[in-house]
Image (spheres, helix red, strand yellow):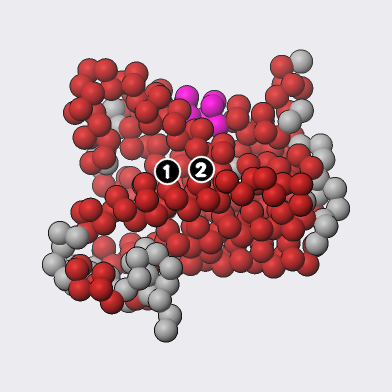
């Protein structure tokens, strides 16, 4: 009965999947004393939510399936990238070290709410467009336009992935220059974050083109866009990058987020 209730609604399935996953990740973080493992599950969580709803939804449509598969590809790629980086760094990220120092002995239980539950709620909210696609199902209203938006999403995924590859190769160079300003990084200071935003706007566009009833989920790409620019993305990263030699000049000639192509 409980399983049937959970799987009766994609929204509830997504919420329970996020809750179970993040609780497990929190317990793991206590065992290994490293809260930064949450970062890799930011992407992996979306993939698991999409997979769980794909496997249990009873009202699937072609566009809904393609949207779910695109999210699984995006989340799986990001999980692998961040997992590899986490293993290479070998220590807790500085952000969580600061939080651990601030909260002291209380961090172990406070992290459940300030880190894991908080990110789980954000994950569920951003997932709303593709959960809505699973909820409504049926034939696509504008299938051609939905496919175009899915291609836009895949273009964003390609940009994000290739920008991360360029950055990884740059960091591995033995005699690297102070800054990476070639490839995608020539046009925007944060091409991986911009590609991320394009992906989620593309997912939203595809869902709405197929299912206009889901237009109310527009808060999801807006929320992700805001996080990428003003919270955990560009804004936070540049507080440290501004201290690097030559970064001020790089800021003057390169757009912060939207690529400068003229």
Residue receiving disc 2: 44
Q: Is residue 109 left or right of residue 210?
A: left
- Whether residue 21 appears in magenta in the rendering, the answer is yes
Front-lying residue, 104 or 81: 104
Residue 239 appears in the rendering: yes
- Residue at (56%, 67%) from the top-left corner? 155
Circle 1 crowding by C-alpha within 10 Å: few under 14, some 14–19, many from 20:
many
> Residue 134: percent from the left, percent from the top?
74, 42
Vertical placement of 39 versus 226: above or below? above
Vertical placement of 227 versus 257: above or below? above
- Residue at (35%, 70%) from the top-left corner? 255
> Residue 77: percent from the left, percent from the top?
50, 53
Q: Which residues are magenta?
A: 18-25
- Residue at (29%, 50%) from the top-left corner? 236
Q: Farthest residue to the top: give it.
A: 1
Residue 48 appears in the rendering: no
> Residue 126: percent from the left, percent from the top?
56, 43
- Whether residue 175 appears in magenta in the rendering, the answer is no
Q: Are marks 1 and 2 in contact (CB under 8 Å)?
A: yes
CA gap, disc 1 and disc 2: 7 Å
- Quadrant for residue 39, please give it: top left
Q: Is residue 150 left or right of residue 96?
A: right
Circle 2 crowding by C-alpha within 10 Å: few under 14, some 14–19, many from 20:
many
Residue receiving disc 1: 40
Secondary structure found at label 1: helix
């Amino acid at each position: 009965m409980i399983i049937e209730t959970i799987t009766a609604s994609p929204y509830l399935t997504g919420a329970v999947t996020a809750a179970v996953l993040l609780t497990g990740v929190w317990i793991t973080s206590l065992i290994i004393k490293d809260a930064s493992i949450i970062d890799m599950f930011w992407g992996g969580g979306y993939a698991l939510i999409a997979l769980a709803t794909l496997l249990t939804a009873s009202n699937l449509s072609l566009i809904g399936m393609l949207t779910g598969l695109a999210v699984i590809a995006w989340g799986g790629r990001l999980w692998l990238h961040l997992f590899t980086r986490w293993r290479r760094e070998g220590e807790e990220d500085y952000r969580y070290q600061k939080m651990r120092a601030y909260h002291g002995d209380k961090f172990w239980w406070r992290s459940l709410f300030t880190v894991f539950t908080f990110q789980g709620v954000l994950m569920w909210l951003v997932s709303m467009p593709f959960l809505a696609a699973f909820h409504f199902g049926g034939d696509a209203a504008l299938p051609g336009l939905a496919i175009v938006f899915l291609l836009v999403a895949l273009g964003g995924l390609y940009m994000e992935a290739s920008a991360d590859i360029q950055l990884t190769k740059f960091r591995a160079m033995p005699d690297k220059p102070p800054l990476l300003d070639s490839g995608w990084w020539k046009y925007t200071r944060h091409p991986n974050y911009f590609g991320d935003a394009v992906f989620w706007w593309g997912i939203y566009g595809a869902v709405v083109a197929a299912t206009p009833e889901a237009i109310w989920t527009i808060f999801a790409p807006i929320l992700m866009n805001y996080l990428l620019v003003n919270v955990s993305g560009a804004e936070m990263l540049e507080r440290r990058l501004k201290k690097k030699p030559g970064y001020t000049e790089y800021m003057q000639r390169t757009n912060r987020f939207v690529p400068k192509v003229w």
